[in-house]
Image (tube, helix red, strand yellow):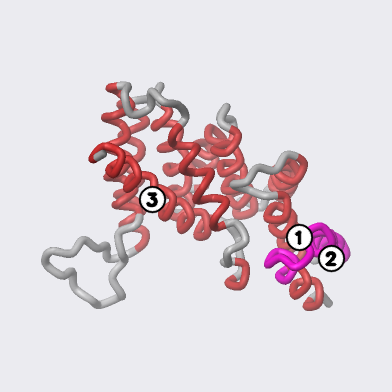
């Protein structure tokens, strides 16, 4: 029972930080940071780290899992407001860059020590997210591409979604569009078709292509009536000039 409780705590912590990191990495507007995919990501990310009954039995993966838990805690450690000193007994970072640097080192350590474990696959994804937060797009692209190529469809979807954001930051619009279209054609619960459509529409908006954006927003509203995704798509479409 105690082992099951520890397992659940690790899953809950992993799910929480993945949601927050994905939101920070993607080009979402404030109103898009809603419940559209929150539950879906939480469920599927938990499944993604399970991978099989042997996961918590295998010695190497057990060690890697413990280190992943530590790295995830680092990645979700609060950042102090500017000018506020650290408080004794409470972990915090002076900046998000300091936090991302520390977490990336921990995640990379897991990859280096346990390269053939499923935990390392997840750690590579986090290396990519941390690198993206640091503006190191080259490292982010490399790690997220590995995640995008994962045999686990859910982890691959998360990798593609975050990688598209990196491509946008690098002005590689064609590559970003291709990834969004892949996610639209083969959606998962972790990245639904509507989520990928809204992201692609938002990219078209940024590229001054309102007609293409509107087509996607209208399609989301049509396919997902009475949903939060439809409501968001309708607001976005109405705001187009």
Q: Please give left or right for residue 25 compared with residue 6 in the image.
A: right
> What residue would you read off at disc 3?
12
Identity of the residue drawn at 45% across and 26% down: 52
Residue 106 visible in the displayed image: no
Labels 3, 1: front one: 3
Q: What element carries label 1?
A: helix
Q: Quadrant of residue 68?
A: top left
Point out the stretch of residues depicted in magenta.
211-232
Q: Disc 1 to disc 2, how far (Cα)?
A: 7 Å
Quadrant of the rendering where the C terminus is positioned: bottom right
In the displayed structure, would residue 50 be above or below residue 46? above
Q: Please give left or right for residue 53 compared with residue 206 in the image.
A: left
The image shows residue 81 at horizontal and vertical percentages of 30, 75
Identity of the residue drawn at 86% across and 61% down: 215
Identity of the residue drawn at 46% across and 58% down: 20
> What residue would you read off at disc 1?
201
């Amino acid at each position: 029972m105690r082992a099951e409780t520890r397992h659940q705590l690790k899953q809950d912590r992993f799910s929480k930080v993945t949601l927050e990191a994905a939101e920070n990495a993607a080009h979402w507007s404030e109103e898009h940071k809603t419940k559209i995919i929150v539950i879906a990501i939480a469920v599927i990310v938990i499944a993604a780290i399970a991978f099989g009954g042997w996961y918590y039995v295998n010695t190497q993966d057990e060690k890697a899992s413990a280190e992943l838990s530590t790295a995830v805690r680092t990645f979700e450690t609060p950042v102090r407001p500017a000018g506020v000193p650290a408080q004794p007994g409470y972990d915090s970072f002076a900046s998000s860059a300091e936090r991302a640097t520390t977490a990336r080192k921990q995640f990379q350590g897991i990859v280096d020590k346990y390269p053939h474990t499923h935990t390392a696959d997840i750690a590579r994804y986090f290396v990519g997210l941390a690198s993206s937060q640091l503006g190191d797009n080259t490292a982010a692209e490399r790690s997220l591409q590995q995640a995008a190529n994962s045999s686990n469809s859910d982890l691959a979807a998360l990798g593609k979604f975050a990688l598209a954001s990196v491509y946008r930051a690098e002005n590689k619009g064609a590559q970003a569009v291709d990834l969004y279209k892949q996610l639209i054609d083969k959606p998962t619960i972790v990245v639904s078709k509507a989520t990928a459509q809204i992201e692609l529409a938002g990219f078209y908006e940024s590229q001054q292509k309102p007609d293409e954006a509107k087509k996607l927003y209208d399609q989301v509203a049509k396919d997902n009536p009475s949903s939060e995704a439809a409501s968001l798509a309708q607001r976005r479409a109405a705001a187009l000039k």
